[in-house]
Amino acid sequence: MKNGRFNLAETGFILVAIPLVFQLVLSFPLSDTLSKIERQTLARLRSTRIISAATQVSLEFYSIAAMLTLFRFTRDPAIADSYRTSRRAAKETGEYLILLTSDRPEQRERAEKVNKLGDEAAAIVSGFEHSMEMGLSAVIEASRFRHQVNRIFVPMINELDALVKEERLRLTGEQPNFDRLFKVIAIGFGANLLLSGFLALFFFRAIISRIDRLKYNLKCCAAREKLAPTLEGRDEFVRLDEAFHRLDDQLTAIESRKREFVAMINHDLRTPLTTLQYVVALALKGSYGEFSEEERVTLAQQEEKLVELVDYINEFLADEKRKSAAEISTDSEVSH
């Protein structure tokens, strides 16, 4: 990826948008897998509840049949009360079984048939509340009782057993696909690592490395060293780097003019002024003849001004030499 292809706003958008898009794409297979597992788990849970409810109904009707037999021979009111309690419990469990199988037509039909047989069984107890017959009548009565019990309870138990078998087949059928879930998670984790590495490299190339280049150029500009080449691209870092290069060019131009100015002072001012100072000094000593008192005073004043001006020039040149020596010393320390 070429540096500077994007500006800072576009770079920030890429760093934010790519992870969001990736997570959105990853969420579809993950959500689909989780939904399937949820449906399969709920179906298995309902099958388990249906098996539990059917088993409970079977146990309650076995208990009812036993209590009917005991009541037939004992006429104990307590047994009759227990029968009625068990019947109510069986009725409630049967209704719950119908509710569990509401969207499964075949299983619902079985549950409704069990409830219907249970309602028929509720009327059996009333037929045996009279006194127990003796002799041949008792034998006939007992035979009739067994026939009624078998007519109702045997089909009921058969329906419940068939319902339990069907739900157990469901449990052994399609299992929740946790392997696919683990694969999706593993693929997502690996892809996240790769994406993180790509974004880290992109961030380094797009921002960090360019900031390092700016820091280097700023340091070189301050130390008056050669700057690294200008950054390529169209982002804000390029404009800032170009500003550093313009600043460096301006400083270089200022230094060049300063050197020209120092050279001008040294050659075009100090030398003529020094020569003129010597000429005035010789004139005051009479080398060019005698001067009037007024002329000598004027020459003395001019000599003082020339000496003062030359001293200023010498001080300025000395300061420039000290600065140059200090810069050379600093550059040597940095290089070491």
Image (cartoon, helix red, strand yellow):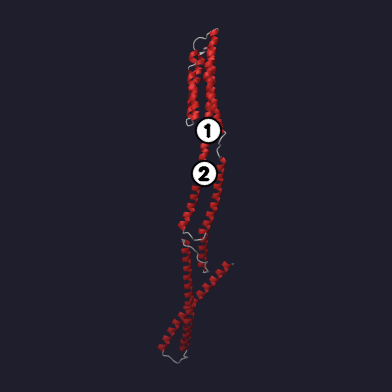
- Which circle's residue, 1 or 2, is located before the other in the chain? 2
Three-letter amino acid code of the residue under disc 2:
Leu
- Identify the residue under disc 1: 45
Residue farthest to the left, as pictured: 294
Disc 1 residue crowd, few under 14, some 14–19, many 20+, Cα 10 Å: few
Which sits in the foreground, 303 or 336? 336
Task: Identify residue type, mark 1.
Answer: Leu
Total of numbered circles in the picture? 2
Residue lying at the far top in this picture: please name it: 135
| Vertical relation: 189 (above or below) 93 | below
SS class, disc 2:
helix
Residue 213 shows up from this direction = yes
Which residue shows up at 54% across the image and 9% down it? Answer: 138
Rendered position, 88 above or below 36: above
Question: Is any part of residue 311 visible from this angle?
Answer: no
Residue placed under numbered mark 2 in the picture: 30
**Along the viewing direction, whichever of 131 and 207 lies nearer the viewer:** 131
Expressed as whole percent of the image width and height from the top left, the position of residue 326 reads: 54, 71
Mark number, residue 64: none
Q: What's the residue at 48%, 19% (across, down)?
A: 120
Question: Quadrant of the rendered structure where residue 58 is?
Answer: top right
Residue reaching furthest to the bottom: 289
Q: Nearer the viewer, residue 236 or 28?
A: 28
* Foreground residue among 88 and 122: 122
Residue 275, position as x, y percentages in the image: 48, 85
